[in-house]
Amino acid sequence: MEGNQPEKTYPTIACCGLDCGLCPVYYTKGPSRCPGCYGHDFRNKHPSCSIITCCVKKHNFETCAECSKFPCLKINMWDKADSFISHKVSLSNLRLIREKGLDDFLKQQQKRIEILEEMLENFNEGRSKSFYCIATALLPIEDLEKALEISNNQIINGEINANDLKTKARLLRENLNELASHKPIELKLRKK
């Protein structure tokens, strides 16, 4: 840690409500890997963020949900456009933290992270990481579990070869898209 500036205790959830623990850059290997929101070495990768400056440096909050001015002008439209991570759920994440508390939110997020890690370990052919990150951020946990169950059953039943990552990835993506099609959820990033 540099000087007396604090790091966030939970870098997998950003001050602004983004799911850093469900971000493709968080799962990148090598020097371009992001440590999450204001985690270890964050300042060297992202030297300036006005939301972190306000939330962590000025108020020593873990997220903006702790602020009496939430949602302020800095973040009140934060969920309207995406970067390399979906912003669609950022403000609803913060509202959930306000309503249920950070511990409950982190338990839910940890479940999403575990599902994502299973997808990356068993169904990533090298091109699906970003899609899986978006899906785990946007779909209900029950749908994520159902998509994995369907996909795993297709392997167990011999419908697909367990060693054919390309086919496994295609089928999991199809299963996730099918479940999303029954909800008003689009599994893609919005261009600015």
Image (tube, rainbow, N blue to C red):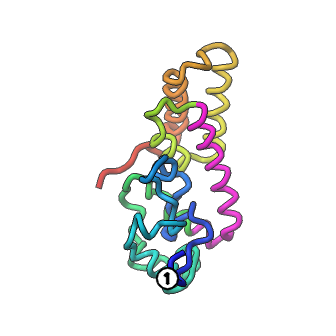
Dot 1 corresponds to which residue? 57
In this rendering, position of residue 73 left or right of residue 42: left
Type of amino acid under label 1: Lys
Which is more toward the observer, 9 or 15?
9
114 shown above or below 146: below
The magenta region covers: 95-122
Q: Is residue 114 left or right of residue 45?
A: right
Nearest the eye: 161 or 188: 161
Q: Residue at x 49, y 29 (%)?
A: 125
For the view shown, which residue lies furthest in the left direction?
A: 192
Q: Tell me the residue at 54%/66% (across/down).
A: 40
Q: Is residue 112 magenta?
A: yes
Q: Is residue 68 left or right of residue 141?
A: left
Judge left or right: residue 26 versus residue 190.
right
Q: Quadrant of the N terminus?
A: bottom right
Q: Where in the figure is residue 162, as x and y percent of width and height?
A: 62, 19
Location of residue 81 with respect to 103 vertically, above or below: above
Q: Quadrant of the C terminus?
A: bottom left
> Magenta stretch mostly in which secondary structure?
helix
Q: Residue furthest top?
A: 158
SS label for mark 1: helix
Q: Which quadrant holds residue 117?
A: top right
In-front residue for pair 17/8: 8
Is residue 39 rendered magenta in the image? Answer: no
- Residue at 62% across, 70% down: 9
Q: Position of residue 21 (x, y in %)?
A: 56, 55
Residue 105: image quadrant is: bottom right
